[in-house]
Amino acid sequence: MLYNNIYIPSRSVGDEDHWISTETGSHILLGEGGEIKAGMGGKFNGQKIGEVVKTWKVDSEGKALNTAHEKKAVSVKPHGTITEKQEGFIKSLLNKKAFTHEDADNLVFEMELKTGKTKGFDVDIDNVGSMSSYTASKLIDALLKAPSKEYAAAKEKKKEAAMDKYSKMIQWAKNNGVKGVKNMMKAKNIRQKIIEAGLDIPNEFL
């Protein structure tokens, strides 16, 4: 349904009355001629929705601002698009969770495999508001399962320390003439080689 070049989704209620819906979940009942019957507190009952909508301005995010009500935000996004609550929650989670663009691409791939569709799943974590409500719900699920940034950073630090220890052990073994030691060999096998060479394994490599 278009009013003043603003799209507002509607659902039929008989031949005359029908509802228009806001993103916040509110519904406005309109008569056959577009007159407001319910849903706006009674103040606008009887007035044409087209006349009321003319007082709204659309901001850069596609939301209507009702200037007659101190510019109170009224969403006019169609059904199926991300809600303000979803968008806010996703942004909050992205600030806390270790979720990368690669993770977003993997989520799209997973959704395509499960649904058999190859279009419509745009998980853009740089532009959250562009997603559909369905995609947003899947992203929220993935974000809730993702580790926190603190945990991921600690895990990465531990991994780097282990790799550094491994590299130093290989180098120490080679410097001390241990035969058969090479990169990609399991750490326990390197230690065995050191023992077979008649050397004591330094505590830092245990």
Image (cartoon, rainbow, N blue to C red):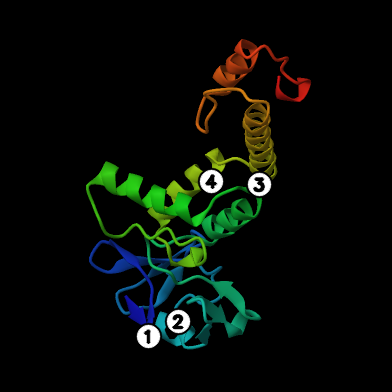
Q: Earlier in the sequence, mark 3 or mark 4?
A: 4
Question: Quick one: 93 or 197, which is closer to the camera?
Answer: 197
Closer mark to the observer between disc 1 and disc 4: 4
Nearest-to-viewer mark from 2 and 1: 1
Does 141 appear above or below 2? above
Q: Does the CB distance between marks 1 and 3 fall below 8 Å?
A: no
Give the quadrant of residue 204.
Answer: top right
Q: Label 2 vs label 1: CA separation? A: 18 Å
**Sequence-first disc among 1 and 3:** 1
Q: Secondary structure at mark 4?
A: helix
Mark pair 1, 4: CA separation: 36 Å
Identify residue type, mark 1: Asn
Q: Tell me where residue 190 appears, x and y as whole percent.
A: 58, 21
Find the distance from the CA under tag 1 to the CA under tag 3: 43 Å
Which part of the image, by quadrant, shows the C terminus?
top right
Q: Is residue 199 left or right of residue 115?
A: right
Q: Position of residue 113 (x, y in %)?
A: 27, 44
Find disc 1 in the rendering and name its residue.
5
Residue at x 42%, y 80% (from the top left corner): 49
Residue located beneath label 4 in the image: 143
Of discs 3 and 2, which sits in the foreground?
A: 3
Tell me where residue 132 appears, x and y as whole percent: 39, 60
Q: Which of 17/134 is in front?
A: 134
**Residue for point 70% across, 43% down:** 150
Of mark 1 and mark 4, the one earlier in the sequence is 1
Q: Amino acid at mark 4?
A: Leu
Q: Residues within 10 Å of mark 2 (few under 14, many from 20)?
A: some
Say which element carries label 1. Answer: loop
Residue neighbourhood size for the residue with mark 4, other residues' Cα within 10 Å, grouped as few (<14), some (14–19), many (≥20): many
Q: Compared to 65, does 106 lie above or below?
A: above
